[in-house]
Image: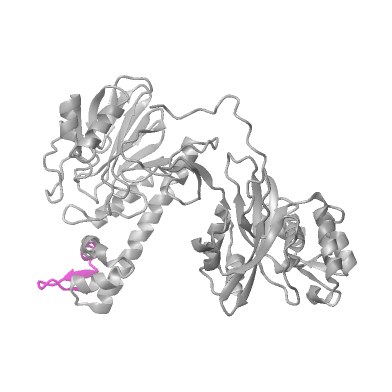
Amino acid sequence: MSTPKPAEAGRPPAAVPRAAASLIVLRDSPRGLEVLMLRRADKPGDQNSGATVFPGGLLDAADSASYPLCDGLDDAVASARLGLPANGLNYWIAAVRECFEEAGLLFARDAGGATVALDALDADELVAMRHALHANQIGMAEVCQRLGVRIDAGALSYSSHWMTPLGMPKVFDTRFFVTQVPPGQTAHHDTTETVELLWLTPAEALDPARALTLMNVTSVTLKALAAHGTAASVIAAAQAQTQVTLMRPRLARTAKGSRQPINNGDWAYAEIGRLDPEGRGDVSTELTPGVPVWLSPRVLRVTAPNGSMMTGPGTNSYFIGAPGGDDWTLLDPGPDIAAHVQALIAAAPGPVTRILVTHTHKDHSPAAAALQAALGARTFGRVADYPEWQDTDFQPDQVLAHGDRLALGAGVTLRVLHTPGHASNHLCYLLEEEKLLFTGDHIMQGSTVVINPPDGDMAVYLASLRMLLDEDIEWLAPGHGFLIDQPHAAVNKLIAHRLAREAKVLAAVQDQGPAEESALLAQVYADTPAHLHAVALRSLRAHLQKLQADGVARRSDAGQWSVV
């Protein structure tokens, strides 16, 4: 085992990002929405060799000479749209230039304001002009002069912003634009950088049977395009954006040992950024049972082999202590599975003197007995108010209360937060020195937790969530899933989700009442797979009981619900 790696001595400096622009050209066809794609030539040393891409390339210093020839957009507006102080119009010009070079489409208007009809012009002359443009023998200003046209910058709508992952030999900072194919023009690929031009529906491009080599950004963009039926819909969605978020994937290691880009919003994304700020690409994309992972010099995680519908990738156990110290604490021992118990004993960074439990559901506390016997550690936690679904064998040596502080060594302090709702005895633990909150099942990644009355209480759960908004925290270490950043945003999202579900429950009671829970379940959880309805029923009851406590709904002696 090793602690997180520092920046490696002698490691090459990170590549300087190079500004680029790419143009997503769309057309409507009887087969549906189609997108223009180009297959790049195979070139040694090209990290995107052979890939199927959208037209695009690097910005050129000469692009700014075309500012006076642009219609529909000036540099001030373009720069504001991109969040740049100046020179934003260069990206629009570069997108137009690269599309003309690579695909033979020119977004420009003639002296009468009509889109230039390239199909009516001399084809050989246009090919020669494209080759000269590619060779930097001429610029867009000369292209416009020769053809007597002006660049139609207003035809391009800013769509997305991507940057190549840290750790790649070449890094591109690329702005993507969307537009419709201009009338009177036929696309032709060049014979220098590309070997094939394709008009494909997004589904066709993504079809594994076609075996296209697609970059991560291309795949993600195609999936987004697949949600639209027309080019106009795509463009309207791009124009409706008030802010375009930078997407910068992070490289990580798969179970097979290969490097894979992980995108913003993917479960492992935040953790990869914390553990690998240099872009080595050696952080795992998966939570592998039994494999110790250092999250900081104070925190080591081991995941149990109990992954399921309810537990996600498995229950996380955490060792917490001072680096190099001989006094370690184990938080959430997990299920009593022999292989997991042995993995924890083997992974312990030093003598374990305390075993902390967030709550006594059967995937979190049962291994405490075996580990206490093996390690001689004392147990800490609380007993639930109701025994159903609980590990009733767990009886802590020390009962913890809200606000208790545990000194675990030099510079390692845990503060106890009583967070009932999912379970009456639920505790979170705040590692004050890192502003890292161990959340157990109060917050888990990728799913909302089940609130199961009577020990679970929806009103109490929401109050416990709101309490966290007053805490100075920067990271969440959940009982299931990877580390989560922006914790207050995560908490607010959970609260909003629960309140939205509550509104659906109330609407269903108003629509159907008096109604049985089974009838309400079908309406409220229509967006949930049927095989999960038995679990969803527990949370439905928690919502109904909260509405009853709020004086909004009532339950008859026959078990039917109606509004008050």
Q: Is residue 30 visible?
A: yes
Residue 11 to residue 30: above or below: above
Name the residue at the bottom extreme: 30
Dividing the picture into quarters, in which one does residue 314 lie?
top left
Q: Position of residue 170 (x, y in %)?
A: 65, 42
Q: How many marks?
A: 0
Quadrant of the drawing holding the N terminus: top left
Residue at 31% over, 34% down: 318
Q: Which residues lie in the magenta part?
A: 546-564
Magenta stretch contains residue 258: no
Q: Position of residue 9 (x, y in %)?
A: 57, 24
Q: Position of residue 263 (x, y in %)?
A: 50, 50
Q: Is residue 243 left or right of residue 525?
A: right
Residue at 36% over, 21% down: 410
Q: Is residue 144 left or right of residue 501?
A: right
Q: Position of residue 345 (x, y in %)?
A: 25, 28
Residue 103 to residue 403: above or below: below
User: In this orientation, which residue lies closer to the viewer: 87 or 121?
Assistant: 121
